[in-house]
Amino acid sequence: MTVVNLTVHGIGTPVRELEPGEDRTWVTVGQFEQVLDAVAGDERVRITFDDGNASDVEIALPRLVERGLTAEFFLLAGRIGQPGSVDADGVRALLAAGMRIGSHGWAHRDWRRLDHQLVLQEFLDAPKALAELTGQPVTRVAVPFGSYDRRVLTRLRHAGVTRAYTSDGGPAREHTWLQPRTSLRHDLGPQWIKDVLAGAPGLKRQARRACAKLVKRVRG
């Protein structure tokens, strides 16, 4: 089966300083609700969250529960409990509501540009810390910035990762190890939602995506 993976970064008014360009992937509460209403009951759609922003629990969680939806939250282990981020109680609230926890690394770094010590922190320490917090294995990851190459993928496999999510966009095959996702954007509207769920990016965009994914897999 073909699936559509959506990524949410932040909702509403940010309560921490955003990184350059990060505002492009923040959406309003109304936009988020539009997306949820469009995907409710659609078994082809998977909802994921990156970065562990406080809005995951404060805004997203009750709206997911209201619609009977579940999602996977990829947290930054080093940000747990920091201002504007999910804290330990928030993690427990997500788990109690039937949500899944994955790793987005430790400190939102580009995984292609790590020295040995940071590789250990991002690929081993982060999922270990999240596993200790959740009481369950954390074996799925979301790649920060969608930045990966052959070496990153090899390291993830050696670290025991059972599924890796990217930001490549477009539909995915249900059970593949490397899963492309489409990030919600600040300017999304009904037509954008319709096109994404239909898997209709246009031939030129589809060709660019396929080329970009091939380059990422073989470089390094």
Image (spheres, helix red, strand yellow):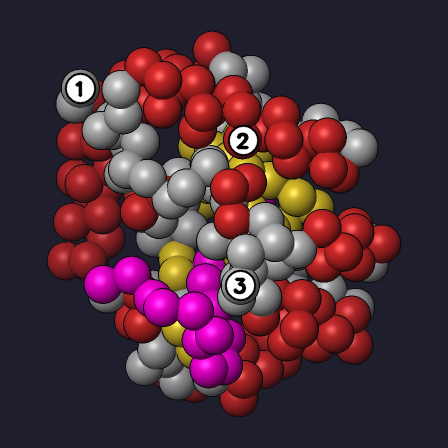
Residue 95 shown in magenta: no
Q: Secondary structure at mark 1?
A: loop
26 vs 194, nearest the viewer: 26
Which residue was labeled with disc 2?
A: 126
Quarter of the rendering containing residue 188: bottom left
Whether residue 195 can be seen here: no
How packed mark 2 is, by other alpha carbons closer than 10 Å (few <14, some 14-19, many 20 or more), is many
Q: Secondary structure at mark 2?
A: helix
Three-letter code, disc 2 = Ala
Residue 96's spot in the image, x, y percent? 85, 54
Q: Position of residue 57 (x, y in %)?
A: 67, 66
Q: Amino acid at mark 3?
A: Pro
The residue indicated by pointer 1 is 220
> Seen from this angle, which residue lies furthest right?
96
Determine whether, in the image, residue 28 is placed left or right of residue 210: right
Q: Quadrant of the N terminus?
A: top right
**Disc 1 residue type?**
Gly
How far apart are labels 1 and 3 at the CA level? 36 Å
- Of circles 1 and 3, the one toward us is 3
Which residue position is annotated with label 3?
A: 83
What is the span of residues highlighted in magenta in the rendered image? 1-20
Give whichever of 100, 18 is nearer the camera: 18
Instruction: Give the residue drawn at x 69%, y 31%.
Output: 131
The percent position of residue 10, horizontal first and vertical second, equals 47, 69
